[in-house]
Image (tube, rainbow, N blue to C red):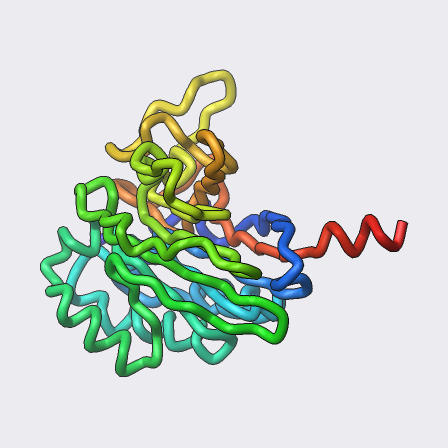
Amino acid sequence: MFGRAPSLEYGLSSHTVSKLTCSDEGLAGRRAVHLSDLHIDWYHSRHDGVINAVAEQRPDWIFVTGDLLNLPEGLSHLYRFLAGLRTIAPVYIVLGNHDHYSGVPVSQFIELSEAHHLTLLINQHVIVQTDSGELAIAGVDDPSLDRADLRCVPPAAHRRFTLLLAHAPNILDQMESHHEVDLILCGHSHGGQWRIPGIPTFWLPPGCNGRVAGEHRSGEHTLYVNRGMGWSLLPFRLNCDPEIVVIDWVDDQQDEDSA
């Protein structure tokens, strides 16, 4: 009900652009955008604003880490948005818990994604070749529902940067030393959705394991938790703007040589 009434939404009309920098000689000069937790059951004007904001970043790739919608009625609106992103750059997607709760069969997500030339990864990986290296993109099904199968992570290779897409932050707790992953992207937390100064985050969905937003490390693995674009339970965000994450790859060795 709330999703059909933009006037009931609060705190979703603007967003924050966060920047991540990754060091990799083979991908230096490349850029990606990460979105999460779209929860699109109805298309609003703010979704056009997100597409325009993503286009301004001129990314080479776009990653979307789950919770695409809540209800089957949202499918046409969701794929309208994703098709808009696809006009900008190749789009890679994984599913979240709400996608499974929605009642939409996984086979329908697969069929619609293929029809719109989107890459949906369900415990799979793809290798993207560039002029000077390659990007391995592994995508697991939702870790918060125990659907993630990390056997899809490819082995390390020369001039390969491996990115892992997952919906929930508890994927970090499932990583082992033999998983050669350079960066993990996820969402699920909504950044707590409601932030009251002086009060610790009081709402996080199961599967966050205390990780609210931003960068987290465990051993050799680095995870970034995106605050997401949408809402859950109630149609408002408080002191917790939706987030677009921009990832830039740089060549640190080149910078050192020129210093």
Task: Give residue 173's quadrant in the image.
Answer: top left
Instruction: Name the residue rendered at 61%, 75% in the picture.
Output: 131
Say if 231 sits above or below 195 in the image.
Answer: below
**Residue 76's x, y, as percent?**
25, 74
Q: Is residue 103 left or right of 223 when viewed as pictured?
A: left
Q: Which residue is most to the bottom? A: 115
Say if 244 sits above or below 193 in the image.
Answer: below
Q: Nearer the viewer, residue 127 or 190?
A: 127
Q: Is residue 161 left or right of 47 when viewed as pictured?
A: right
Q: Is residue 7 visible?
A: no
Task: Give residue 27's quadrant in the image.
Answer: bottom right
Instruction: Name the residue rendered at 50%, 16% in the picture.
Output: 198
Q: Is residue 121 visible?
A: yes
**Residue 204's x, y, as percent?**
31, 31
Q: Nearer the viewer, residue 34 or 237?
A: 34
Task: Give residue 200's quadrant in the image.
Answer: top left
Q: Assign the N terminus to one quadrant of the image.
A: bottom left
Q: Nearer the viewer, residue 237 or 126?
A: 126
